[in-house]
């Protein structure tokens, strides 16, 4: 879940660049309380990443995604731990 945006985030230099990034992310739906999910990462370097928010999927550069603050829900964390445990190879 999105918990907020980093107001000082900038992928380019200058205040106008950081403000336009924050504005763009808000316009895309990255607002507090919105549910989001990383659905894909590019193989080399992981840039860009595909992020689903609401019913839409967007490609964000890692520097842009770094401006989004998230909270992992307790149920999602439990599911991730259970999934990691089920894919472990026995010794």
Image: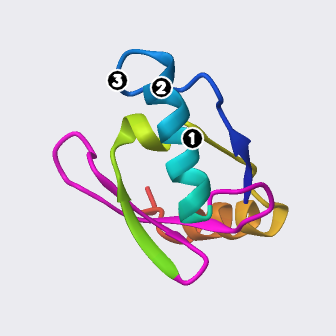
> Which residue is nearer to you in this view: 83 or 69?
69
Q: Horizontal and vertical percent for residue 66? A: 50, 36
Q: Residue at x 54, y 51 (%)?
A: 25
Residue 16's tag is 2
Query: Hey, which quadrant is residue 82 in on the image?
Result: bottom right
Q: Which portion, as a residue range, is magenta?
A: 30-55
Residue 68: percent from the left, percent from the top?
60, 43
**Residue most toward the bottom?**
55
Residue 80 shows in this picture: yes
| Residue 66 visible in the current orientation | no
Label 3 vs label 1: CA separation?
12 Å
The residue that mark 1 highlights is 22
Tell me residue 7's x, y (percent): 65, 29
Residue placed most toward the observer, 64 or 16: 16
Q: Which mark is residue 12?
A: 3
- How far apart in space, not on screen, are marks 2 and 3 (Cα)? 9 Å
| Left or right position of 9 against 39 | right
Question: Residue sitting at 66 percent across and 60 percent down?
Answer: 81
């Amino acid at each position: 879940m999105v918990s907020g945006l980093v107001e000082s985030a900038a992928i380019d230099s200058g205040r106008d660049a950081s403000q336009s990034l924050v504005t763009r992310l808000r316009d895309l739906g990255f607002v507090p309380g919105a549910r989001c999910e990383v659905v894909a990462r590019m193989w080399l370097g992981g840039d860009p990443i595909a992020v689903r928010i609401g019913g839409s999927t967007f490609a964000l550069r890692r520097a842009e995604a770094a401006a989004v603050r998230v909270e992992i829900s307790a149920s999602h964390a439990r599911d991730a731990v259970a999934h990691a445990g089920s894919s472990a190879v026995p010794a």
